[in-house]
Amino acid sequence: MQYKAYSLQNLRTLPQLTHLSEEQIRDIEIVGSVLPFRVNDYVAGELIDWSSIPDDPVFVATFPRREMLPAQDYSRLRSLHDSGADAETIKKTVNEIRMGLNPHPAGQIDYNAPVFKGERLPGIQHKYRETVLVFPEQGQICHAFCTFCFRWPQFTGIDELKMSSRGAGTLLEYLAAHPEVTDVLITGGDPLVMKTDILAGYIEPLLAADAPNLQTIRIGTKALSYWPYRFTTDRDADSLLELFRKVGHSGKHLAFMAQFNHPVELETEVVKQAIERIRETGAVIRTQSPLLRHINASPEIWADMWQKQVALNCIPYYMFVARDTGAQRYFSIPLTEAWQIFYEAYRSVSGLCRTVRGPIMSCLPGKVQIAGAGRLSGEDVLMLEMIQGRSPDWVGRPFFAAHDDKAAWLSDLKPAYGEEKFFFQDELDGMLQPGEADSAGGW
Ligand SMILES: *Cc1c(COP(=O)(O)O)cnc(C)c1O
Ligand code: SF4
């Protein structure tokens, strides 16, 4: 299949557009000027069932719609467009709206970019002791953009919202200076939009350096789901798989972290073939997805998805809570409901699917799992537990929040049992620079 992508510029040439009304197309254009929009012909032609528009889950996941913006922002932008306002005015409004959508949740830029030799490293994040994240400059785009994306500012063209790294040089130095790091996670955007030789420019120096601490190279990608031809018929598909093999032969583990949001993404012949080809290289595919209203908010969908993944030799890894950024208002699910969906699905599948952990909030102190909900010692509570923490000592210590039907993020929760703060609060405050806590936009 030849790759063809559609963005706002050529949206009106997308063949399937005949299924939409002029009003729906207009909304894609208006909302798509704030939240990034891009789709390709595999997603549009093979994954979306156009007879179920507008409720089709992959359509919801890739096409912007009115409800994804706050109502007053939508009307403001709409009237500017309708009255033929000039490009400069529209751009200014678009940027204001973007800044109101919490572009950098959980203090990603303020707190996770490490300082090395007196300078903040561009395109590298180091939050949890063992794992360093790399954002290669050429991988800051995706085969199609997800409307729920928490990395959306990467694609807006606003420079100060971007994180990106050029080459492996500083990364190698950083690894040598940090023997506690065992994992390098190459992420984006989607690093597998990069040509193999550019990706190799990051991976081969890592292998050549033969850093004794480095055990695992992870690649976070949506390519399996949105462009499986990357592993089958693309011109450099074979050389990509050869690169994966090389990682294995050098004694490192290649962990392929695939995002799948709905079982339909696992059903085409080409995705099955792609999974098989990746697995033949020795790489292990682990899967993750956020829990999203209008896309996958039911235990049946998750159980089906995990079972299909296990049947295809993939390992379910994470279920995330939708982050407090971008179009979250449209996708968000209260934490108690998230817990119910997770456990109902979890109880209905075999132990081989229960490698998955969730629901997890990736927030300022760490990855916080909702481990239980119910009545304990006379109070309705949520039991929480960190499975990753800014301090490794926080991991695995249960803590309790008062039950709250509406809470959708850690920052909405209050400690239970009359406690004033959660156990990690003082230590966390001490880690953040004075005065910076406000700019983190909460947790
Ligand atoms: C999730 C995450 C990791 C990886 O954590 P694991 O528990 O090892 O999967 C690393 N860094 C950041 C910032 C993360 O959010
Ligand atoms: S694939 Fe990931 S980074 Fe790319 S748009 Fe989707 S959620 Fe965002």
Image: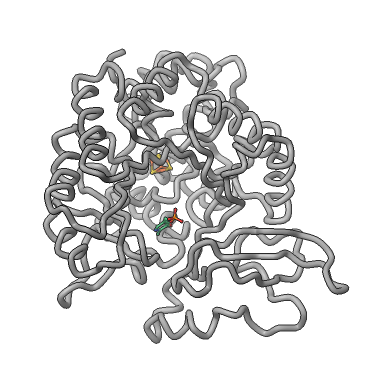
Residue at the right extreme of this rendering: 378
Q: Quadrant of residue 369?
A: bottom right
Residue 211 relative to residue 287: left or right: left
Q: Residue 340: percent from the left, percent from the top?
A: 74, 48
Q: Residue at x 46, y 41 (%)?
A: 31
Query: Would you say residue 82 is visible in this rendering?
Result: no
The residue closer to the viewer here, 129 or 352, is 352
Q: Residue 54: percent from the left, percent from the top?
A: 60, 26
The residue closer to the viewer here, 81 or 44, is 44
Quadrant holding ligand 1? bottom left
Compared to residue 375, the image places residue 8 above or below, namely above
Q: Residue at x 27, y 56 (%)?
A: 163
Q: Quadrant of residue 85?
A: top left
Q: Residue 175: percent from the left, percent from the top?
A: 21, 62
Q: Residue 423: percent from the left, percent from the top?
A: 60, 80
The residue closer to the viewer here, 289 or 413, is 289
Q: How many marks?
A: 0
Q: Residue at x 33, y 64 (%)?
A: 126
Query: Would you say residue 442 is visible in this rendering?
Result: yes
Q: What colour scheme was applied to this rendering of the protein?
A: one colour
Q: Residue at x 46, y 16 (%)?
A: 46
The N terminus sits in image quarter? top left
